[in-house]
Image (tube, rainbow, N blue to C red):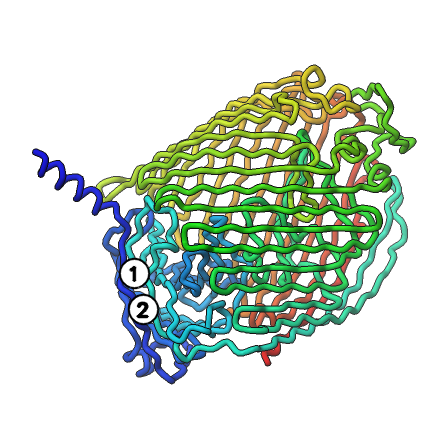
């Protein structure tokens, strides 16, 4: 009996143990393959042959239904990979001409490379059958994938009667690695995505789902003895020309157009000081972004909206600055004259630093019930430092420092963080930070709500909701000199198995904490959260392939132990045929409303506690090649933040992405939101975002973007006076040509306008013609 039990236990332990792979060598061949997607050169017969035959998602290690082979070698300066992807039905291959990083739903082949072999991050390079590139960096510390990274590498693909070929050349200079070691070892995974009725992820390795670190499980490949990263310089001069027309609209009268012509040369320099150290500098940079942001509705929302970074100077090696909390959000820097950035990674030491000035000062004033952004036309200096030491693949410790200053204003943050992987299934994260902030009188004046603008803090003021009162939460946060120094910390623990995971976290931010170079919209709170998730795996006999049940409970108080929010939520999702997914959930939440006396930060006795119940459903499907549809619906009780009462909210957002042929794409997104209270409408909001793209080839496209906002309010159902109508319309026509991520040409036109109660129609108040050209010289 004892021997039988021991045998069963041993078998169980073996079944859940991580797969180990012998270190394999990649051949060195002093030949550069021609990257044309034909796979017809003799050099590929000498390359290492790697089978990609194991389905790792949605199943765990199932036999692949299609045959895929990768051929790999290096020549000292580049890594060469060729993929032979067989397909029994090549007419079903999903492949379209798209912009870079926009083909993730297509058939794909690619490689993940952990160039330091430290299980902390991996380059991801994927290619569709037409040669369209997707690349990103997977960060094991933050569990995020950053698709904003754009390396310069070459690829080509071709579809044929038996499937498709893809050829890739990755110059080793785009990878960070330690070239002080003669024989270098990198962890790699070779992957194919096969989207049909299911979207299969097929790999050359087996992956244990109980171990949520997939990078840690990648096989090792050795070689690269001739690989060196000499000190190289990239010069990227740019020229931006624009003609902008603006006019003031006073009531129903539109003023004369005012013209402003602008021609700005700039220079970006990237210097590989050593193979492990890189210096980026930019002079008179054009830090404007070409692509229009996705439209967002901001009605009935008390916290600031988040917009991601899209500018290349900040995106390069952005993962070097990552920590558990978002302490460095570079969208805060609007219009700098210069920027300098240094990054380095060697033998476990990772360093990132940048300094940039700014012609503008944008600062978020956080609170526990809302936040407010103030902007000034004054110069500021911005500094960020990040250091991380990786003791091994299980333990990392890092520190972050940020500083912003302008005239008498300044904000400094110092943080210490760590991630410790106790076992393959258990991960603990921690971060602590302190801050010191000084505001000027200009902040107080900018935040005043009253007509007089006199924000002197009286002893016992009474400021009723929506009254003409100078004081509000943001003003009080600035005025309170006792809140200039702050403390915060974050703790997180997670246990993960194949079929389930449990997690808990605790976050504390006192009332003086600020992170003005980061994105921190809420302070003066402590939040405890605990959750659980269970997963089911389908097989060939089930119509579904994965199912998931999730639940969590959290409770939030302020520094004075007054309740801000208590919430429980649960949802169930299932993945089915036609790459479909249905996720349905319910939420029960108790939360505070607005303060009755805005001159006091007290919560108890100064706010009402409301109960929100919400039911939501999300559905998506990719039924055929080139079609994506989704629908998000939610309904339930919602606090009307403009009038401090409970209302009934309904929200629906359909999304349709449609490809017509290989070159034409239509993306449509619409948000419809209504709120009713006291038996009458409060508002009805519509936001439509339409983007039409014609992709001429791998390098160029023409895109039209139209974003339309339409908000109708019922003034008789508001405490304060509001416009009954607000309509906004912005358009952009953009031509783009990209030889590579740094050699680009853009030309376009954009305009915007609005309508309120004093205007009879949408009236344009801004027009811009623009052109940008940049060229990358690698020296």
- Viewport quadrant of the N terminus: top left
Q: Residues within 10 Å of mark 2 (few under 14, many from 20)?
A: many
Residue 320, x across and y down, in percent: 55, 57
Q: Does label 2 or label 1 sit earlier along the sequence?
A: 2
In the image, residue 490 above or below residue 525: below
Of residues 244 and 11, the one drawn nearer to the viewer in this rendering? 11
Element class at badge 2: strand
Could you say which disc has been placed on residue 185 in the image? none
Q: Which residue is rendered at x = 62% and y = 62% of the image? A: 312
Q: Is residue 37 visible?
A: no
Asked whether the beta carbons under mark 2 and mark 1 sit within 8 Å of each other, the answer is yes
Could you say which disc has been placed on residue 204 in the image? 1
**Spatial separation of the CA atoms under disc 2 and disc 1:** 9 Å
Q: Quadrant of residue 585?
A: top left
Q: Which residue is mark 2?
A: 70
In the image, residue 597 above or below residue 181: above
Residue 573, x across and y down, in percent: 39, 35
Q: Is residue 311 visible?
A: yes
Q: Which residue is rendered at x = 39% and y = 61% of the image? A: 108
Total marks in image? 2
Q: Quadrant of residue 434?
A: top right
Of residues 318 and 264, the one drawn nearer to the viewer in this rendering? 318
Of residues 380 and 682, the one drawn nearer to the viewer in this rendering? 380
Element class at badge 1: loop
Residue 627, x across and y down, in percent: 45, 51
Q: Which residue is rendered at x = 87% and y = 47% of the image? A: 254
């Amino acid at each position: 009996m004892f021997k039988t039990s021991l045998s069963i236990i041993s078998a169980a332990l073996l079944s859940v143990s991580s797969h180990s792979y012998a270190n394999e060598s990649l051949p060195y061949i002093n030949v550069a393959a021609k990257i044309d997607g034909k796979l017809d050169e003799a050099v590929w017969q000498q390359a290492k042959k790697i089978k990609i035959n194991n389905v790792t998602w949605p199943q765990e290690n199932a036999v692949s239904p299609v045959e895929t082979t990768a051929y790999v070698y290096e020549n000292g300066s580049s890594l060469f990979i060729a993929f032979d992807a067989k397909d029994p039905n090549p007419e079903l291959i999903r492949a379209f001409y798209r912009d870079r990083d926009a083909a993730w739903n297509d058939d794909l082949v690619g490689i993940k490379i952990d160039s330091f072999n430290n299980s902390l991050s991996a380059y991801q390079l994927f290619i569709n059958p037409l040669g369209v590139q997707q690349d990103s960096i997977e960060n094991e510390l933050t569990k995020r994938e950053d698709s904003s990274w754009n390396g310069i590498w070459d690829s080509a693909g071709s579809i044929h009667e038996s499937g498709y070929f893809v050829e890739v050349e990755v110059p080793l200079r785009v990878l960070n690695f330690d070239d002080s070691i003669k024989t270098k070892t990198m962890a790699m995974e070779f992957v194919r995505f096969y989207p049909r009725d299911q979207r299969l992820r097929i790999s050359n390795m087996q992956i244990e789902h109980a171990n949520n670190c997939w990078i840690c499980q990648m096989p090792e490949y050795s070689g690269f003895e001739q690989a060196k990263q000499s000190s190289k310089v990239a010069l990227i001069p740019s020229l931006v020309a624009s003609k902008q027309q603006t006019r003031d609209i006073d009531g129903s009268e539109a003023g004369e157009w005012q013209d402003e012509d602008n021609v700005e040369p700039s220079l970006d320099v990237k210097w590989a000081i050593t193979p492990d150290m890189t210096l980026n500098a930019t002079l008179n940079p054009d830090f404007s972004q070409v692509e229009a942001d996705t439209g967002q509705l901001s009605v009935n929302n008390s916290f600031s909206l988040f917009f991601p970074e899209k500018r290349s100077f900040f995106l390069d090696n952005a993962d070097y600055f990552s920590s558990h909390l978002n302490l460095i959000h570079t969208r805060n820097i609007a219009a700098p004259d210069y920027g300098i950035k240094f990054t380095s990674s060697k033998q476990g030491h990772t360093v990132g630093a940048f300094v940039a000035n700014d012609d503008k000062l944008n600062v978020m004033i956080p609170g526990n019930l809302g936040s407010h952004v103030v902007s000034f036309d004054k110069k500021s200096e911005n500094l960020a430092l990040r250091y991380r030491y990786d003791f091994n693949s299980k333990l990392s410790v890092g520190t972050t420092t940020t500083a912003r200053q302008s005239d008498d204003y300044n904000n400094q943050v110092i943080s210490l963080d760590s991630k410790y992987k106790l076992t393959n299934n258990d991960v603990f994260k921690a971060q602590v930070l302190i801050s010191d902030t000084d505001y000027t009188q200009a902040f107080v004046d900018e935040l005043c709500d009253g007509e007089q603008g006199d924000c002197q803090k009286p002893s016992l003021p009474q400021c009723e909701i929506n009254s003409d009162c100078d004081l509000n939460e943001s003003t009080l946060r600035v005025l309170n000199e006792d809140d200039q120094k702050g403390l915060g910390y974050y703790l997180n623990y997670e246990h993960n198995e194949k079929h389930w995971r449990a997690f808990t976290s605790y976050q504390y931010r006192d009332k003086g904490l600020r992170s003005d170079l980061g994105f921190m919209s809420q302070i003066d709170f402590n939040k405890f959260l605990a959750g659980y998730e269970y997963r089911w795996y389908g097989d060939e006999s089930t119509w579904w392939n994965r199912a998931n049940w999730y639940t969590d409970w959290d409770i939030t108080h302020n520094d004075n132990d007054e309740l801000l929010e208590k919430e429980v939520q649960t949802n169930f999702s299932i993945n089915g045929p036609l790459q479909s997914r249905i996720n349905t959930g319910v939420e029960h939440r108790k939360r505070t409303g607005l303060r009755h006396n805005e001159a006091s930060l007290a919560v108890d006795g100064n706010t009402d506690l409301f109960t929100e119940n919400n039911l939501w459903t999300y559905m998506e499907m990719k039924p055929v090649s080139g079609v994506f549809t989704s629908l998000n619906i939610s309904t339930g009780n919602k606090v009307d933040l403009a009038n401090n009462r409970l209302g009934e909210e309904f929200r629906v957002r359909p999304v349709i992405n449609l490809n017509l042929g290989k070159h034409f794409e239509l993306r449509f997104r619409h948000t419809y939101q209504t709120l009713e209270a006291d038996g009458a409408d409060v508002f009805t909001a519509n936001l439509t975002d339409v983007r039409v793209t014609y992709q001429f080839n791998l390098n160029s496209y023409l895109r039209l973007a139209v974003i339309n906002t339409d908000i109708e309010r019922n003034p008789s159902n508001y405490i304060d006076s509001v416009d009954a109508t607000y309509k906004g319309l912005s358009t952009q026509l953009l031509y783009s040509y990209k030889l590579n991520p740094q050699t680009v040409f853009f030309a376009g036109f954009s305009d915007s306008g609005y309508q309120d109660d004093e205007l009879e129609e949408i009236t344009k108040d801004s027009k811009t013609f623009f052109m940008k050209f940049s060229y990358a010289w690698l020296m």
